[in-house]
Amino acid sequence: MTEPLLKSASVGKSYPHTVRSSQRLRAFWQILTRGQTEGGTTVLESIDFEVRRGESLAIVGANGAGKSTLLKVITGVLAPSSGVIERNGSQAALLELGAGFDPEYTGLENLRMNAAFLGLGRKEVDEKLDDILAFADIGESIHEPIKHYSSGMVVRLGFAVVAAVTPDLLITDEVLAVGDESFQKKCIRWIENYLEQGGTLLMVSHNMYQVQKLCRHALWLEGGRARALGDVFEVTQAYLAWHERRDAEAVSQSSGHATAQMYGVKTLEIVSAEAGEPRLTMGDELLVRMALRSPDDRAPVALVGLVRADGTPIYGVASDHDQVALQDGSDGCYHLALRFPDLPLLPGGYVVRGHAMDPEGLRVHDTAEVTFTVTGRSRELGLVRLQHHWEI
Ligand SMILES: Nc1ncnc2c1ncn2[C@@H]1O[C@H](COP(=O)(O)OP(=O)(O)OP(=O)(O)O)[C@@H](O)[C@H]1O
């Protein structure tokens, strides 16, 4: 098997605490004896992954998760505090805006220096110059110092040079989001073509649509640790579901008082609620089971709702809408099962909400929630898959 173009083995990064002058001697001694000071902030911890030729890996995670730090360690801008980064083949990184450019030099001078840095000889640059300039499409500004460029122009020039070099491994972060839309599309088309030709990509992005479009694998960082690594759809869907749940928690915490009042008086209650497997594949059956206990002999009404993890309602149905009367079981509970065959939900995090209502179906007395995740390979948008046909 060929060597990976990039391998991260137990990579960690920590920053020392800022040291007061009274502590300097101790810190100095620690650096001499252990190579680093005690304590400090750990930003990355034991990150393992590899990228082989022809693969595409996205690094995703919330703000502050450690993505930029990991990219800096990968590209050699920062040294890891522990572990090793192994690189094989040529790399080109499009990272922070204008990194590698000198603001005092013109676009053309920077282009030549950057191309040389990425391994293109003078002759090759001359041969490719027209293509590079056509890709960047910044006209006569190429003869102006970079310090007069807009951020979009800097990105255009940076990408045009990378496109001319066609590295073994292309590393990029959110920088592409800076350019205008038509240039972004041009870059995406270039990357798709580069991948089709066997190129290898490592990118950081907050845009899951773009990540799913360009990458086959993803690494999810959370608090400096790898929370998941694998198929891009599985990892990004789990990441989005986590986000939705976090947002929903924030909302329910702010409205906790209202919820307590609403469900405070329990005259009938939900004894158990389940929704089959916690992970379903798109199109599977969802089977919801509940057991309700009534304080008297009258059968309660069950209401079952499906909501997205962030609380967006999708569907709800009550037993009395469908003229179904719940039957009292031998254990004194009313048991019910509700099947949703061929569940049309798109991949993501969802919640089944079961409500126990009085026999009149007027008031909710108890509520139970069961979360589940739908997985699958789909790039459709929204909540449900709708039957559709293109007519052209
Ligand atoms: N020089 C430093 N000293 C101490 N802590 C740092 C330093 N640089 C970054 N950090 C901390 O490391 C953590 C990870 O930062 P990083 O920029 O890598 O996150 P990120 O995932 O790229 O975030 P974003 O999506 O907002 O760009 C943050 O908590 C940040 O405050």
Image (spheres, helix red, strand yellow):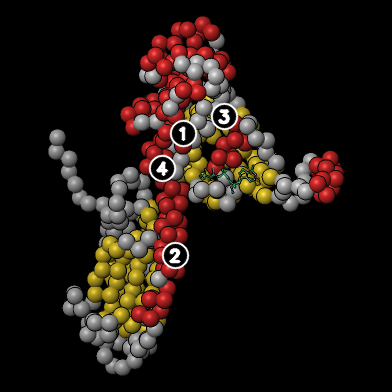
Marks 3 and 1, Cα distance to the nearest angstrom?
22 Å
Residue at which label 2 appears: 249
Mark found first going from the N terminus, 4 or 2: 4
Q: In the picture, which quadrant includes the N terminus?
A: top right
From the Cβ of disc 2, is ligand 1 less than 8 Å away?
A: no
Q: Residues within 10 Å of mark 3 (few under 14, many from 20)?
A: many
For mark 2, give the secondary structure: helix
Q: Nearer the viewer, residue 130 or 231?
A: 130
Q: Are marks 1 and 2 in contact (CB under 8 Å)?
A: no
At x 20%, y 78%, the residue is: 320
Residue at which label 1 appears: 175
Across and down, in percent, residue 6 comes to 58, 32
Mark found first going from the N terminus, 4 or 1: 1
Q: Nearer the viewer, mark 4 or mark 1?
A: 1
Residue at which label 4 appears: 207
Q: Which mark is residue 5?
A: 3
Q: Are marks 4 and 2 in contact (CB under 8 Å)?
A: no
Q: Residues within 10 Å of mark 2 (few under 14, many from 20)?
A: some
Is residue 250 depicted above or below 282 in this figure?
Answer: below
From the Cβ of disc 4, is ligand 1 less than 8 Å away?
A: no
Is residue 160 depicted above or below 192 in this figure?
Answer: above
From the Cβ of disc 3, is ligand 1 less than 8 Å away?
A: no
